[in-house]
Image (cartoon, grey):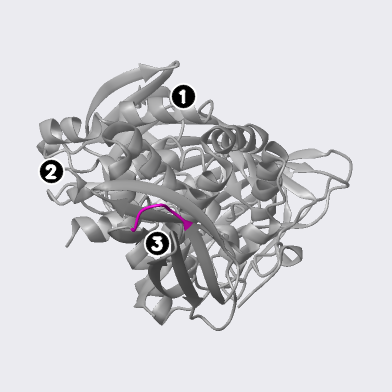
Amino acid sequence: MSIRILLGLFLCSAFFKFSFAQDVYAKNESVDIQNYVFGLHLNDASNEIKGETQIRVLFKENPAPFSLDLIQKNGAFGMEVTKVMENSSQANYTYTDNKINIVPKNSKDSIQTYTIKYQGVPEKGLVIDTTKFGKRSFFGDNWPNLARHWLPSVDHPYDKASVEFQITAPDHYDVMATGKKMEESNLENGYKLTIYSEPAPVATKVMTIGVTEFASRLVDNIDGIEVSAWVYPQNRLEGFGDYTVAANVFDYFIDHIGPYSYAKLANMQAKTQWGGLENAGTIAYFENSVTGNKTVEPLIAHEIAHQWFGNSATEKSWNHVWLSEGFATYFCILYLESVYGDERRKEELAIDKQQIFDYYRKNPAPIVDLSIKDPMKVLSTNTYQKGGWVLNMLRHRLGDGVFWEGIRNYYATYQNSNVLTEDFRHMMEQVSGEDLESFFQQWLFVKGHPQIQWNWDYSNENINLNIKQLQDHHVFVFPLEIGIVKDGKLTIKTIEVNQRNQNIAIETKDQPDSIVLDPNEWTLFENMGKL
């Protein structure tokens, strides 16, 4: 999802051996949820929903106890469970501490189906409200772990599953959900049943529904995938105009990264707490993203990039969320670079760089911050903008050809699966033939960035460059391009910075008019001025 873009529109070391640490969700690796069928009954008389969920469970070993997340009724909000079935008989279960704890009675079958019937008023996750035009609406807004407020599930991205939504709602609503529409039937009692099915595995954080009055249009069909726009009828023409660019973005990512995982790509105006939420195949954009001015292209590019990174290749631990947000941030920049040229890349990175420096002064922490336990706190300038900058530096180090080959191999290997940072590192090492451990550690697991003071003079046909790293917790090692300006012409030389205090001689026949550090925005460092 995009935080920075929303705001813009409105206005310690750790090592790889600890990569699995900290995310405190109790993962049950012996159980694999294969499929959810969420039957939901919505109404206009109240905000109470009724649910009947069927869950197909694969036990990797012998059937063993497991848990599903569902927030219990407490006051006005939460869910009451009325029945839990194991196959066709009553299940052995308890419902405590917002967990449905199930002890399988069938000890033989490796795949079993459980049915949960429940009802209640969700406080979060399913946003039941009115649109900005006063129309009643229901929107799924699950990120990061809010599905448990309305969907019994393993509410963590480590266990993804195919999903079907069977939504019964008053027949005046248009219904959108994760997956491809399989059925729309008038029930002749003032209600309508709409079914959507997504065969690819999806994390609960990016499952969604949208139920309100919509205007919709097919934007394009790319590689057999329908790209569409779903907006409020009052915003019909502006919304279709703003969201049409999604087809160009979608085509770019398929061409450069690899095949798309999901049944469709719908772009939906919605009630969401985020600037955009990258729900799998059904992206939600905040209501005022529709302006008719076609200014939302970067937001659309960011959210569509997530379909590959975060949705399909999904972080296994919340502490590695840069694999989602850092990737979406940089791949948005790559798309903009492809359309508007390299100057746009440099402009975007320069903006991001300043935000990184400002953030660090108040929040000195690494990108992969193993001190964070709450997934709501993993999103930051570090996981977005700094994560994007790491990919920019990696691209420059490896070269475009190797970088893109590594990205395509990484996605092909982990499509519809889960990853950690070390998995990405290993893939890029395999493709490049380089040892990248020190690169990954200093930029992702060490806090901060190089803060340098410098000066230069010229004598004896040499530029004498003096560089000092001011940060006291770590000496960064990095290549640095030096721009030598003479008579309006820029010449690039590259040096290796690897000491706290360094004196470097660069041979050049003529005395430069000026020196510029990193003129092409390839290295993340803070220029602290002259020595």
Mark 2: few/some/many CA within 10 Å (<14, 14-19, 20+)? some
Numbered disc 3: secondary structure: loop
Q: Main secondary structure of the magenta part?
A: loop
| Whole-number angstrom distance, CA of label 3 to CA of label 1 | 37 Å
Mark toward the viewer: 3 or 1: 1
Mark toward the viewer: 2 or 3: 2
Q: CB under 8 Å between callouts 2 and 3?
A: no
Q: Is residue 440 magenta?
A: no
Residue 197, above or below 471:
above
Which residue position holds label 3?
A: 124
Q: Determine the residue positioned at 70% across, 57% down.
A: 437
Which residue is at the far bottom? 472
The location of residue 400, given as percent across then percent down, is 51, 36
The location of residue 270, given as percent across then percent down, is 27, 46
* Magenta span: 507-511
Does the image show residue 144? Answer: no
Q: Using the image as rendered, state which of residue 280 and residue 527 is in the foreground.
A: 527
Which residue position holds label 2?
A: 291
Sequence-wise first label, 3 or 1: 3
Q: What type is the residue that disc 3 sits on?
A: Lys
Mark 1: few/some/many CA within 10 Å (<14, 14-19, 20+)? few
Q: What type is the residue that disc 2 sits on?
A: Thr
Q: Using the image as rendered, state which of residue 526 and residue 38 is in the foreground.
A: 526
Which residue position holds label 1?
A: 255
Choose top left, top right, bottom left or bottom right for residue 226.
top left
Mark toward the viewer: 1 or 2: 1
Does the image show residue 415? Answer: yes
Position of 482 with respect to 402 (left or right) is left
Position of 516 with respect to 452 (left or right) is left
